[in-house]
Image (spheres, helix red, strand yellow):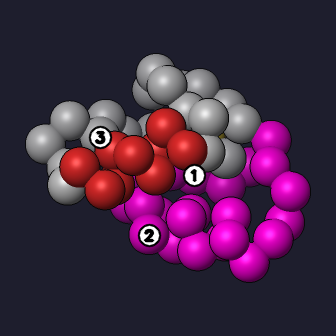
Amino acid sequence: VQLVRSPIGCKESHRATVRGLGLRKIGSVSELEDTAAVRGMINKISYLVKLL
């Protein structure tokens, strides 16, 4: 997963989800296991991230 948009101005829960996925700066990439929990987190912030 790659962060492509800044979470500034988003809900606090969305910012916490971004941090929970291990993403910090725009362009940062995190390799994650394919689990239901991770899919739910990605779905929640789909407008901020890109799947690689």
Examine the image and state in which quarter residue 45 appears: bottom left
Q: Residue at x 59, y 26 (%)?
A: 28
Q: Residue 31, position in %: x, y?
A: 80, 41
Report whether 35 appears left or right of 38.
right
Q: Which residue matches tag 1?
A: 50
37 to the left or right of 11: right
- Binning the other alpha carbons within 10 Å of mark 1 as few (below 14), some (14 to 19) or many (20 upward) gives some
- The circle on residue 27 is none
Disc nearer the start of the sequence (2/3): 3
Residue under numbered circle 3: 7
Disc 2 element: helix
The residue drawn where x is 39% and y is 46% is 16
Q: Nearer the viewer, residue 34 or 12?
A: 12
Q: Amino acid at mark 1?
A: Lys
First in sequence: mark 2 vs mark 1? 2
**Residue 38 percent coordinates (x, y):** 68, 64
| Gap in angstroms between the C-alphas marked 1 and 3 | 14 Å
Which mark is drawn over residue 44? 2
Give the extent of the magenta segment: 31-52
